[in-house]
Image (tube, grey):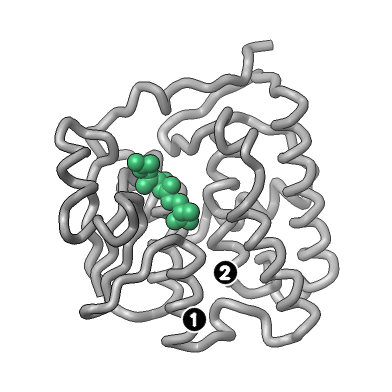
Amino acid sequence: MKLIIGNKAYSSWSMRGWLACKQSGLSFEELITPLFGEDWDDVRLSENFAPSGGKVPILWDGETVVWDSMAIVDWLADKTHRDRFWPKDETARGMARSMTAEMHSSFMALRRQCPMNTRKIYEGLTFSDDVNADAARIIELWAQARARFGSGGPFLFGTYGAADIMYAPIVSRFQTYGFRLPGFATSYMQTILDHEWTMQWMEAAQEEPWVIERLEKTEASES
Ligand SMILES: N[C@@H](CCC(=O)N[C@@H](CS)C(=O)NCC(=O)O)C(=O)O
């Protein structure tokens, strides 16, 4: 398998696709293409990229191409062991499915105003009401998952799975922008930040030479 991803410092959807490949346990080659470089228009129209409309991540599994992080999670879950990605228990699985779908479709204010930037740490920011509302909803989802289904381990549904994969870039954003969070959420964040795959991703991001100026800024304000 070949996984095409963008910059590790900035590309949150790539991070999800990459974590899903890791979780599958299958071997894969990663191809990093820096986003929005000078030749970006040529890159996005190239044969490898074209099926996704020029967005990463893109998974080539032999001749089969799968793009969009949620489709990649599902593809890999179908191909391997579904219970590596989704809880076995039906009630837990219903919640895991719903909160990963909500991550994929929602939280636009947080995503736009606080872009992922794994190399940066801000202090003392204040956020708009819509960003605070997104963060509050995420914390509510994490709290429910941990309280109802998290007794088997430190992850959202006990063991590491699709929900942790989809929310890992949110953990990175909460760290970057210095969100003040309840204790259980800080512990969960630390669990994700200490996970070996998160650490590998962040270390590689640190080594990247590329800088995308507009993603080095936030709409949050200094208090
Ligand atoms: N819904 C897609 C989103 C993919 C996406 O927007 N990826 C960004 C990088 S994080 C991208 O490729 N941007 C390039 C562009 O918009 O031209 C997914 O879940 O994979």
The percent coordinates of residue 157 (x first, y second) are: 70, 71
Task: Name the amino acid, label 2.
Answer: Ala
Circle 1 crowding by C-alpha within 10 Å: few under 14, some 14–19, many from 20: many
Q: Name the residue under label 1.
A: 77
The percent coordinates of residue 3 (x first, y second) are: 28, 64
When the figure is inspected, residue 143 is found, relative to residue 24, above or below; the finding is above
The percent coordinates of residue 214 (x first, y second) are: 40, 23
Residue located at (69% from left, 70% from top): 96
Question: Residue 23, can we see it?
Answer: yes
Task: Name the amino acid, label 1.
Answer: Ala
Residue located at (44% from left, 64% from top): 19
Question: Residue 198, can we see it?
Answer: no
Indicate the secondary structure of the residue bearing disc 2. Answer: helix
Along the horizontal axis of the image, is 158 left or right of 3? right
Along the horizontal axis of the image, is 148 left or right of 98? right
Circle 2 crowding by C-alpha within 10 Å: few under 14, some 14–19, many from 20: many
Q: In which quarter of the image is residue 129?
A: top right
> Who comes first in sequence, dot 1 or dot 2?
1
Instruction: Mark 1 and mark 2 in contact? Answer it, CB < 8 Å.
Output: yes
The percent coordinates of residue 57 (x first, y second) are: 36, 57
Which numbered disc covers residue 162?
2
Q: Nearer the viewer, residue 160 or 46?
A: 46
Q: Which of 117 and 130 is in front in this view?
A: 130
Residue located at (39% from left, 54% from top): 14
